[in-house]
Amino acid sequence: MITIGVDFHKRTSTFFVLSVDGKKMKSCKLENVPEAIRNFIASVPGPKRLAVEATRSWGLFHNLTHDLVDEFHLGHPKKMKAITTSETKTDKKDAEIIAKLAHSGFFPEAYASSVETRQLRSLLRFRHFLVNQRRSIRNQVQTLLDRNIWPVQRPDSFKNIFCRRGLAWLKTVRLPDRERFILNQCLNTFEELNQKIQTLETYLKEQTFNLPGLEYLRTVPGFKSGRVNALMVLIEIADINRFSKAKALAHYSGLIPREFSSGDKHRTGHLIKEANHYLRTAFIESTLAAIRADQGLKAYYKQVKTRSGSGSAIIACARKLSYSVYHVLKEQRAYWPEPFPPAAACHSLTVSNN
């Protein structure tokens, strides 16, 4: 099969074509004009595969070219060390390396999701972006209050200053003119973000989601009422069959610690960084609700909390939750309640049946 390696950029694309026996056939650099790109790929004879590194706009290239080739391969950018560590880095050299890796079978594959999945993912990630902005505004307001008002001078009729009573108090609290101006801007931005998030969530409710496994995922504690997190998990996973085991999903979600082992020494560190942070956030946010709903998971949480603290316990439960989601989606079945930890491990715990 003929192999086409592509170094895809915003304005230009460099192509490097290898024959069936791995010899160079031709190479060229084209402006990113859709007709020119399609004409070049169509001019390459015989069965052919195309390999390109995943970039911000890889979906645009995929939509344009996938129907012209027999195989479309998307490369994982962080695993293509042959390119990132190369001492002679040019567009032509990168395209050649991509072509040779794809021809030899050592091309580090990334998952190429469908157009609909990418669009839904963009929608949910945009909501995540707005929620983070709103959180930043809340932190700004809290910092402003901390530097201007003593805690004993604040009303005790509410705990959350962003509840209805709290917002009414914020609009009337006396502050220096400059600080009052900042607070007013923060409150206006907070209200605008609230409105945008509500509009987006209304739009989400109006959408028809044909997502396989959604009915099974909704049986998992933490995802029964958390509709947005359930959608986020399904959209970010896309296809559960691309994970060979439950630990692979936990690793992709960033819920596995780093490991430094050599010889008889075994050490673990913080959570891995090269992961899907949207998926990790969805699992962690769903964990607290899951702990309240599943008594076995609650007992496990208490066991780990006693040994390592609440932060580690939340992460451990989120990891268990990801394992459960894997099996539920893989086996297309409802959730099975988490078994209680062995009695010897939690003999000092009092597990409530409420």
Image: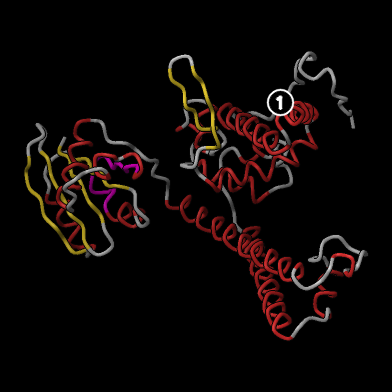
Compared to 6, does 262 lie above or below? Answer: above
Q: Which residue is mark 1?
A: 336
**x and y, in percent, of residue 35 in the image:** 20, 63
Residue shown at the point (47%, 27%) measured from the top left: 260
- Residue 326: image quadrant is top right
Q: Foreground: 253 or 333?
A: 253
Residue 210 belongs to magenta span: no
Q: Amino acid at mark 1?
A: Trp
Number of disc labels: 1
The residue nearer to you, when weighing 228 against 154, is 154
Residue 191 x %, y %: 70, 73
Q: Quadrant of residue 155?
A: bottom right
Outermost residue toward the right? 157
Disc 1 on helix, strand or loop?
loop
Residue 339: % across, % down: 74, 21
Q: Quadrant of the N terminus?
A: top left
Image: 188 above or below 200: below
- The residue at 51%/21% (across/down) is 266
Residue beneath the point at 52% across and 54% down: 120
Check if residue 73 falls in the magenta segment.
yes
Q: Residue at x 62, y 32 (%)?
A: 319
From this view, report whether residue 16 is shown above or below residue 127.
above
Q: Indicate the position of residue 332 as horizontal and vertical percent values.
A: 60, 30
Look at the image and give the residue range highlighted in magenta: 65-76
Q: Residues within 10 Å of mark 1 (few under 14, many from 20)?
A: few
| The C terminus: image quadrant | top right
Q: Is residue 199 above or below residue 354?
A: below
